[in-house]
Image (tube, helix red, strand yellow):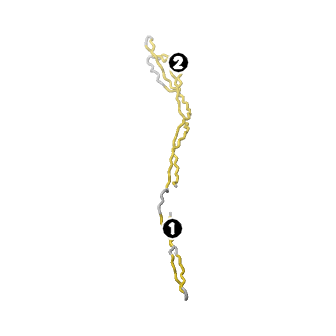
Amino acid sequence: MNDVTLEMPPVHDTLETGRETITIPVVEESLSVTKRIVEGAGVRIVKRVVTEEVTVEEPTVHESAHVERVAVNRLLAPNEPLPKARQEGDTLIIPLFEEIVVVETRTRLTEELHVQLSKTETVTPQKMTIRREEVRVEPLT
């Protein structure tokens, strides 16, 4: 803020004519400027946390197996190798064995497990809370 002071000192000028003296005031203005610092200018920052619920839809995978028992009941020859587990298409075949007593011991293939895997996908909405901050700047008066 500026303070302005006007000073007007009286000044006189004298004019002499033949008979009398006339005094005429002459006015002059001068200017004096000063400054001062004023406290209180600034800003205020206001910050707040806002929470909101959002729904997340993320697919989940569930895997299941269907097992079918298939009877085979075949005797293996004495030197025949044991069948191994094998894959046929999307089916895993696992042979099961038992020994039976005859005059000699032989292995008989009694059954196979046919295992088919399947997948199902489901979307389960999940409610979650997320946070964010908001900032407001206010001038101080």
Residue nearest the observer in this picture, 105 or 46: 46
Kindly identify which numbered label has been placed on residue 71. 2
Q: Is residue 27 above or below residue 140?
A: below
Kindly identify which numbered label has been placed on residue 4. 1
Mark 1 Cα shell of 10 Å, populated few (<14), some (14-19), many (≥20): few
Q: Position of residue 129 (x, y in %)?
A: 52, 39
Residue at image x 52%, y 52%? 138
Query: Under tag 2, what secondary structure?
Result: strand
Question: Could you tell me the amino acid type at mark 1?
Answer: Val
Q: Is residue 132 above or below residue 72?
A: below
Which one is closest to the eye, mark 2 or mark 1? 1
Q: CA distance from mark 2 to mark 1?
A: 115 Å
Q: Position of residue 63 (x, y in %)?
A: 52, 29
Extreme bottom residue here?
18
Q: How many marks?
A: 2
Q: Is residue 16 above or below residue 118?
A: below
Query: Under tag 1, what secondary structure?
Result: strand
Q: Is residue 32 above or below residue 128?
A: below
Residue nearest the observer in this picture, 72 or 132: 132
